[in-house]
Image (cartoon, grey):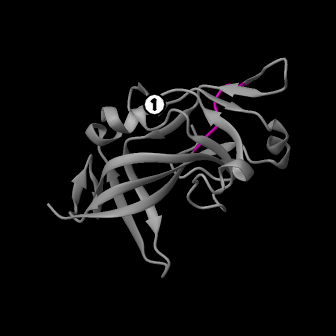
Amino acid sequence: MKLKKVSRLDSVPLGEAFFTPEGYLRDRPIVTTCGIFEYEDDDGTVHYELRLPEDVFEPDSLKSYKGKPVIYTHNAGEITKDNVSRETIGTVLSDGIRDGTDVRAEIVIHDADKLQRGLRELSLGYDCDLEEKSGTWEGQHYDCIQHNIRINHLALVDTARAGHR
């Protein structure tokens, strides 16, 4: 099996959140799901990537959520020690938690004023290995399969790739 390392940005809406006495937003939203996601390459080509349950819920993948920064949009790209202090508006507090075919995570957004700008959906930034293997899953075509999913950050965004649940 030949794998290619790539980075991905996948989105879902914020869940049922509450504000702490300090004004922080706390939530346990769905942050991703299994299934086939649509991606567009730089040249405009669209392709479909399968995220199988065994990869989404793989223990090392779920462990990679905890402690990752929550940022405002994906404009910063990959978050590292060099940009984390200027980009972070919150933190993922837990490992990924399986909830049916979804993954939830405990989060806190310290700079809740960013929510005033209208971005209310969440998008994971992560690296994964792509297996260039097409097929059909639950009646839908896919072009490749994501494996070894490792989270880099969670971003507030405008539109959620993973759905509007």
Q: Does the magenta stretch include residue 80?
A: no
Q: Residue at x 37, y 41 (%)?
A: 34
- Look at label 1 and name its amino acid: Gly
Where residue 81 sits: x, y (%)?
A: 60, 52
**Majority secondary structure of the magenta segment?**
loop
Q: Residue furthest top?
A: 21
Q: How many callouts does the rendering have?
A: 1
The residue lying toward the viewer, choosing from 15 and 21, is 21
Where residue 12 sits: x, y (%)?
A: 57, 43
Q: Quick one: quadrant of the N terminus?
A: bottom left
Along the horizontal axis of the image, is 162 left or right of 73?
Answer: left
Where residue 42 sits: x, y (%)?
A: 50, 78
The residue lying toward the viewer, choosing from 164 and 39, is 39
Q: Does the magenta stretch include residue 13?
A: yes
Q: Which residue lies furthest to the bottom in this view?
A: 43
The residue lying toward the viewer, choosing from 148 and 141, is 148
Where residue 60 sits: x, y (%)?
A: 34, 36
Question: Mark 1 highlights which residue?
Answer: 96
Write the start and end of the magenta stretch as one range. 12-17
Asked if residue 57 can be seen in this view, the reply is: no
Is residue 56 positioned above or below 21 on the image? below
Along the horizontal axis of the image, is 94 left or right of 85?
Answer: left
Q: Is mark 1 on a helix, strand or loop?
A: loop
Q: Residue furthest front?
A: 82
Q: Quick one: quadrant of the C terminus?
A: top right
Q: Which residue is drawn at 68% across and 55% down?
A: 73
Q: Residues within 10 Å of mark 1 (few under 14, many from 20)?
A: many
Q: Residue at x 56, y 47 (%)?
A: 153
Is residue 24 positioned above or below 132 on the image? above
Q: Residue at x 42, y 55 (%)?
A: 127
Asked if residue 125 can be seen in this view, the reply is: yes
Is residue 159 positioned above or below 46 on the image? above
